[in-house]
Image (cartoon, rainbow, N blue to C red):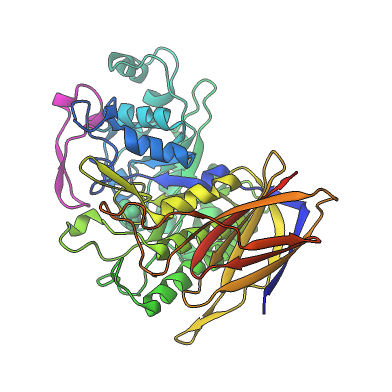
Amino acid sequence: MPLQGVLNADSGKGTINRNIYGHFSEHLGRCIYEGIWVGEDSPIPNTNGIRNDVVEALKQIRIPVLRWPGGCFADEYHWKDGIGAKETRKRMVNTHWGGVVENNHFGTHEFMELCRQLGCEPYINGNLGSGTVQEMSEWVEYLTFDGVSPMAELRAQNGRKEPWKVTYFGVGNENWGCGGNMRPEYYADEYRRYQTYVRNYGDNRIHRIACGPNSDDYNWMDVLMREAGRFMDSITLHYYTLPTDNWQDKGPATGFDEHAWFSTLQKALRMDDLITRHRTIMDKYDPEGRVGLIVDEWGTWYNVEPGTNPGFLYQQNTMRDALVAGLTLNIFHKHNQRVRMANIAQTVNVLQAVILTEGEKMIVTPTYHVFDMYKVHQDAELLDLSLDTGSYQLDGGDIPAVTATASRDAKGKIHLSFCHLQPQAEAQVTIDVRGLAGSSFTVTGSTLTSGRIDAHNTFAQPDAVKPQPFESFQLEGGKLTVNLPTMSVTTLELAAK
Ligand code: AHR
């Protein structure tokens, strides 16, 4: 039986904020160092110390916003250690992540240069856990003050006269945990104090971001919204997908069975419920929807690759991750009224990375391909799509066989994306496309699929998993029938002839 759906192509449900396609890069393992920053003298082709291949790949997926420097690292980071001549920058131990030496060669100027090369917005996360109010305040002054001031002068001495434009600024990270083990009441007060000194200089307007809850900590959300809601522009949510409930043994990134496939997708789908419940709390204190929800850490978290530093969080990335990415983006679209940004963890070589590097070599992962296929939804109008999702059952669990989303871009093209979660069966979907007002359409498509649940790209086989042109569909009399391959992410484009 085909799954039935209805697309109201003339019924918009608001814009899908492009920042939902954001990324997160922390001083963790080989994300910043090696993955992004190789230094000006490296034999790896670079521009001002930043890898050209990585920049090109990220530009291709139109990365809109990049969060830095952490994560847990943010609440131990003292930004003044990362400015000035590189030889004199402080060396420190990265206590959270692998106990390796951090030489601070990648600092504020280098991050802003990275964002310039990428053409993306910076999202800087300040240190509330172990930094002072003055330190945070001065960072914002250093970044954005246009005029005569101690920090503007220091910036000029370091080679940058003009201020940068910085919109997104986080006031602490995971302050319920690595950011200070605070109670929500205490953090709410601290947040109010710190954000007071995060100033708007000139015409720069800071979007103040409060540290929100860990997954289902609804009390944290309630207390923050009640006590500090009016002092914030957005609040964060962190949720990671593990195949098991055991942080000591999360399961491998490859070489898993269908049980782990299923449980991972089932847990990833939890994002919908988490957002719904946090939204309900936010609605109570902010019925107008002024405060945004930013899911600034999400993605899969497995055991590290055998033989790698456990503190580096390096993991492979398979078709399973592609499905997690696609279904999560579908969920973010659905919640576009509140979810205004999301940042997958983390850009290169860490957790659900879109890029992996090994020396001068670089590959892109199945997750990367999903971001590439889905970029057509950035800033597009979400369309009203209802779908009988079917049912995929295993181990007493029951999840949708298919999830989908649809949008219309500025040129009037309609894009539909489908995530088909079943690894053993195909699925047929028939969508009644309404509201096309007599135009005739050409349909094109691409799909990401594989015969193996743990199919992935390696440095020896970089294109083992990549999107293929897709033609298994029919549009007739306003009915679009699509034959979705097993375990696949598919995007179709309907363009008026
Ligand atoms: O992304 C890895 C870590 O996960 C981040 O540093 C922290 O914020 C979260 O716990």
Q: Which residue is drawn at 51% across and 83% down?
A: 393
Q: Nearer the viewer, residue 6 or 21?
A: 6
Q: Which of 104 and 194 is in front in this view?
A: 104
Figure quadrant of residue 247: bottom left
Residue 35 spot, x, y in % from top left: 27, 42
Task: Tally the marks.
Answer: 0
Q: Is residue 406 above or below residue 163?
A: below
Residue 347 spot, x, y in % from top left: 36, 47
The picture quadrant for ligand 1 comes to: bottom left
Figure quadrant of residue 481: bottom right
For the C terminus, the quadrant is top right
Residue 294 spot, x, y in % from top left: 50, 50
The reply to whether residue 482 is in sight is: yes
The reply to whether residue 236 is in sight is: no
Q: In this view, does 232 lie above or below 259?
A: above
Region rendered in magenta? 80-105
Q: Is residue 205 above or below residue 98?
A: above
